[in-house]
Image: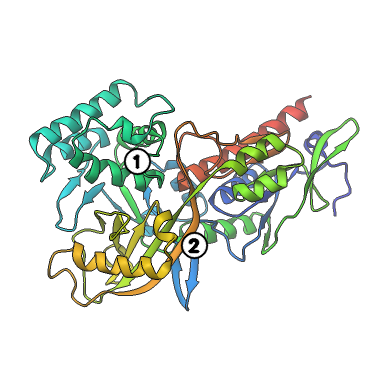
Amino acid sequence: MDRQPHTLAGALSGRRPPRAAVVGAGWAGLAAAVRLTEAGWRVTLFEMAPRAGGRARSVEVAGTPLDNGQHILIGAYRDTLALMRLVGVDPDRVLHRQPLALVDPSGRGLRLGGGAAAAAAVRGGVATRPWGGGERAALLAAAAGWALRRFRCAPTLTVAALCAGLPPRLRTELVDPLCVAALNTPAAEASAEVFLRVLRDGLFGGAGASDLLLPRAPLDALLPAPALAWLAAAGAELRPGRRVERLAPATRAGTGVAWQLDDEPFDAVVLACGPAQSAALAAATSPGWADRAAALRYEPIATVTLHAPGSRLPAPMVALASDEVRAPAQFAFDHGQIGGTPGRIAFVVSGAAPWVARGRDAIAASTLAQASSAFPPGTWAAPPAVEHVIVERRATFRCTPALDRPPARIAHGLWAAGDHVRGPYPATLEAAVRSGLAAADGVAAQARAAAGR
């Protein structure tokens, strides 16, 4: 163990590279570890699970390799795509890119064409069938009003209240599925402020910003495995299957503050684990921050994988009418159209708390019935059968209005990363990556300031 004086100022005075611990190897932790390693830090990455990826990971179910859920990226995820390229991943190879399309089982619905996203949205809204002229005009008027207000609103407003003036059909067929897909929170409870930010960056983020990027490779291949290989090659220390139990400050006279994880010293620490574990580790040092993290509430997502050999959906992603009684899923994904197993269809149940309470068997049976009834005759070349039901009970935090999310900075040399950390986005991969990069930059900036003093 390093017995040198262990402080930020001492570490940057030329005696040795500074040492950082990143707790958690999800997408936020991987982003922080890569950024700090790039900046010349000696990084130790802790992960309590046997494999990296956090809530966007590959798993093995009954001997079959699967992802823990059907994840979606969009073209506006620029930091995520840049990180993938940095660690040697070609996004064009592992992601299926297509213009945003919200089509129903009959193939009708909103389809955006190429070009700038805002212009494509206008063209798509005008051309969408079977919406009537009044419905299309209402959509364009609402979008224009949001744009004039720079996609800002009162932080206490819900998505349902924001869109209350839209015709019911638009709310049911467009707003509700977009909201639950982006925020994993029902429109009646979801933050309009965050929803508008997502629309702004998707529609006005430049050409391709609103494109759907659907994984055509396992989630491990998108970032976790390549990032771990990159970190190992760069000299980082990886500790999978290692749970951190204790975090405490270690003050040394005249030199500032360093941190100890289970009695091992580090110049700085990034807590990139889940909110509950981060709150437990930070409780003694920063009880106010810990209380905020512990107060977050969560929404589950269930993914039901069906297999129907020879079957093909009308589009790679199909929007479904859902309810809390008979039809659980809001979207179905045809893996055969994005480079996966032909005939394998993933049905995604977002905002899944009422269904999760009924159990996996009920989710499976209802999804199977929904698949059989929602699609036109001839869709299924063979009767679909349930392969797997995967439930991520804490898939995302509930993105409600005026939510008090914990800040990234916890204390000097102690930062948090994760999609739950305060920021403009809901719980997405891009939010996780951005938070990891921001935490690493905050650590480095504090270290430079300490060295200057």
Residue that lies at the very extreme toward the left in this rendered image: 133
Q: What residue type is labelled 1?
A: Ala
What x and y, as percent, mark residue 261?
77, 50
Q: For the N terminus, which image quadrant?
A: bottom right
SS under mark 1: loop
Q: Of callouts 1 and 2, which one flags the residue occurring earlier in the amino acid sequence?
A: 1
Q: Which mark is residue 412?
A: none
Q: Which amino acid does label 2 sit on?
A: Asp
Question: Is 369 placed left or right of 259 in the picture?
Answer: left
State which quarter of the image contains the C terminus: top right
| Of 162 and 48, the residue lying toward us | 162
Q: Which residue is drawn at 50% across and 34% down?
A: 403
Relative image position of residue 131 (x, y in whole percent): 12, 42
Which residue is denoted by mark 1 in the rendering?
187
Q: Name the residue under label 2.
A: 220
- 229 vs 23, left or right, is left
Q: Would you identify the image quadrant in which residue 409 lies? A: top right
Residue 32 position, x and y percent, is 60, 45
Residue at the outermost top position = 148
